[in-house]
Image: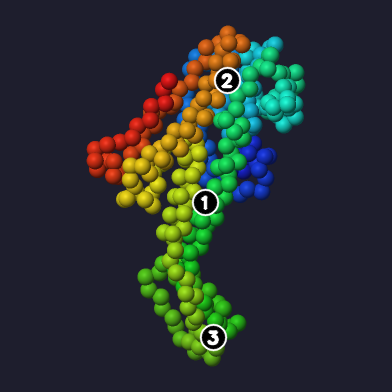
Amino acid sequence: MIDLNGYCAEWAIHFPGCDNNFFEVMLFYFNQYMSRFKYGKIPESIEKTQLGMVNLDRWLWYAKAVCFFEDDILGLQMLPVSSDSKFNIAFYPEKWTVYGGNGYVRRDLNNKNSVLVFNDHTRIPPILYVMHYVKKIVELEMTADQNTVLNRQPFILEIEEEQEKSANKLFMKIKSFADLILLRKSSKKGMGLEKSNLMNTGVQFKVLDYLSAVDKYENKILTYLGINNVQIEKAERLITNEADSNNEKIYSQFTAAFDEREKALKQVNKMFGTNITIEPNTLKKIENEEAQGNGNSVTFDYSK
């Protein structure tokens, strides 16, 4: 297991009580999320202090919004928005506060001197949705591991207290996949396992069922992020209408995230005289086995 202590401190502040298994899976989907867009013509001030635009998507992962603003010393900057924003009658922020990792705080920001960027039309951080299904995935993977172990030892051995040492040795040999297990009959009455009671637990091998459920939850996450996926359990009989329906969901989710960023960056460029660009990192291509067999594929071109 990866030791993530310290590396996930930023997330742990917002979501305490989550263990390394959770963060290992979350990091996988976080990287998927981070790979969707690429930015160009980045202002020097942002390159200097933030090493590019990576923080925009990084902060939108867990913050409700990111704000672009002009600092008297640092120049154009972007930082996550805190939770003490004030709203108008339509629940759109009128004033907001940004914060930095070194204690930097700016409280005089509004729509006349700054621009807000939201992750998508819902204005909800994606980590909330992804975390919901990652918890289910982790539980299923742990259950699959447990089911595998129980199928390696599908019996309960009822023993006397004096037989515990011999029973533990037997268990360790089974656990280590020993090719040959030799049991020596004890010369002392009650010390061997010859009179132990062996009970079958009746545990069935269900690992494939659990992993199939993991695939379903993963597809939900990837669809939400606008990333290509195929409904695996239907792969052999996936018809064109079903594939198109899934593709439309992926496209709409991707477009919602892309449009929010593009719209905000146009406002940033107008307000601060910049020329920041955004484009999809790759063309999104979805193929299923049936389409491949017919020599057809479904291609999404997200370029404007």
Instruction: Give the SS element for disc 3.
Output: loop
Mark 2 or 1, closer to the camera = 2
Residue named by callout 3:
191
Residue drawn at the location 60% of the way across and 35% of the way down: 125
| Chain-order first, disc 2 or disc 3 | 3
Q: Which residue is mark 2?
A: 264
Q: Amino acid at mark 1?
A: Ile
Q: Residues within 10 Å of mark 2 (few under 14, many from 20)?
A: some
Disc 3: CA contacts within 10 A as few (<14), some (14-19) or many (>=20) = some
Question: Is residue 186 in view?
Answer: no
- Rounded to the nearest angstrom, the CA distance separating label 2 from label 3 is 77 Å
Amino acid type assigned to the residue bearing label 3 in the image: Met
Disc 1 target residue = 137
Residue depicted at x 50% and y 39%: 224
Judging depth in this view, the residue of 194 and 19 nearest the camera is 19
Residue 105 position in % (x across, y down): 73, 23
